[in-house]
Amino acid sequence: MQTRHNEETLDHLHHSMISEFSKTLEMFSLNTTESQLFVILYLSDEPMTLDDMKNALGKSKTAMSNSIRTLLDYNLVERVWIRGVRKDLYKAEKDLYGKFMKAYVNRWLDAIDRQKSNLKQIEEHIQEDEIQSDRQTSVKLKEAIRFHDALEDVFNDINEKDIY
């Protein structure tokens, strides 16, 4: 009876750890499934197949495939090869801080670049078509561009200092 109680307690603690750790990872713009999948892979001593992941999370194989693709895109997991195993295997990167910070900073820089480009296109459109915008709109547009420039500077500084 004591052994069963210990197993239930350990299982509960394991699920609690996955839940709490994944909440932190969601702040890095991963969805719940991606975050939980990363934690499961991180906690696993062995690489896992999509079927292993599906069974561990109780989600569909399609959901696991989509989530693993996102994690691969962010370099948070890697595909591994084991002799004699025909299915794809995946494991989490163990340098959590470095990998997450690098992925996060790069995502911010990509988003900032897109937004600055869009804002500058709006500004060019106003100028090319000689649209009469009120002074306040022009000022606000320039402020938005300066805001994105400042964000870009901060994230480039973080990237260059390689603090992760």
Image (cartoon, grey):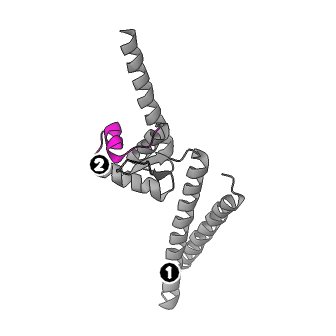
Which of the labelled discs sits on residue 61, or is there none?
A: 2
Q: CA gap, disc 1 to disc 2?
A: 41 Å
Q: Residue at x 52, y 76 (%)?
A: 117
Q: Amino acid at mark 2?
A: Lys
Q: Tag 2 or tag 1, which sits nearer the N-term? A: 2
In the picture provided, is 141 more to the left or to the right than 4? right
Q: Amino acid at mark 1?
A: Gln
> Label 2 crowding class (10 Å Cα cut-off): few <14, some 14-19, many 20+?
some
In the picture provided, is 142 more to the left or to the right than 130? right
In the picture provided, is 126 more to the left or to the right than 98? left
Circle 2: element type: helix
Image coordinates of residue 41 in percent, x first then y, are 45, 42
Taking the magenta stretch, the answer to whether it contains residue 58 is yes
- The quarter of the rendered structure image containing the N terminus is top left
> Label 1 crowding class (10 Å Cα cut-off): few <14, some 14-19, many 20+?
few
Query: Mark 1 highlights which residue?
Result: 121
Q: Residue at x 39, y 19 (%)?
A: 7
Taking the magenta stretch, the answer to whether it contains residue 47 is yes
Residue range in magenta is 46-59
Image coordinates of residue 85 in percent, x first then y, are 37, 47
Question: Please, which residue is most extreme toward the top here?
Answer: 1
